[in-house]
Image (cartoon, rainbow, N blue to C red):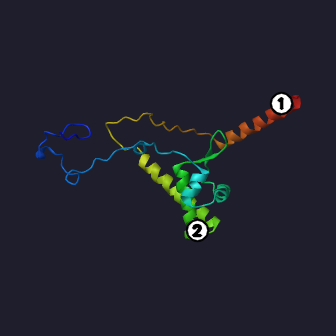
Amino acid sequence: MVQGEFFDVSHAKPEDELPDSAAQPERSRRGLKDFTIPKLYRSISEVSALAGIEQYVLRYWETEFSELRPHKNRAGNRVYSEKDIRVVNRIKELLRDERYTIEGAKQILKQELESERKAQLADIKPTEDDDQLPIIPPPKPTEITVQISELHEIKKSLLILRERLALTK
């Protein structure tokens, strides 16, 4: 009687054998690493390693570029969001690869971020559907007509009132 590792194979037939691993693709096993949560924030050392830039350079860029403002956690350590990392990579491209000066890179970065914001605002604008009612009705335009001479009179009377209040103190 021949014994297998977990079962008795003495009465097994050749056609009962399991198919070759080449005929059937291997099932991939999922480990815990497949289910990791992506990081929302990274430390300055991680960003430094990702971008290939020293930490002191990142700190200097924070002082020069108003667009690069990483938040700080409770301990006071910088935490970079994905947006901050994109800005760091773009600054690196402008300064190192395209050889812009800091002032030139500031201007280009400001223009790019403004155009990006405008594009996002254009995407957010609501469509004009008859079926959909606006959540907040738009304010009705009200017209206030006041003569300039009336405004000057109001200004004079307020100035007189201010002088009287200053004298009573």
Report the front residue among 121 and 12.
Answer: 12
Which image quadrant is residue 130 in? Answer: top left
Residue at position x 57%, y 54% from top? 47
Give the crowd class for mark 1: few <14, some 14-19, many >=20 residues within 10 Å.
few
Instruction: Please provide percent x and percent y for residue 27.
Output: 28, 47
Q: Left of 13 or right of it: where is 111?
A: right
Q: Is residue 128 above or below residue 91?
A: above
Between marks 2 and 1 in the image, the one whose residue lies nearer the viewer: 2
Q: Earlier in the sequence, mark 2 or mark 1?
A: 2
Q: Quadrant of the N terminus?
A: top left
Q: Residue furthest top?
A: 168
Instruction: Please provide percent x and percent y for residue 123.
Output: 42, 49
Report the front residue among 8 and 69.
Answer: 8
User: What residue is pinned by disc 1?
Assistant: 165
Residue at position x 68%, y 42% from top? 149
User: What residue is pinned by disc 2?
Assistant: 96
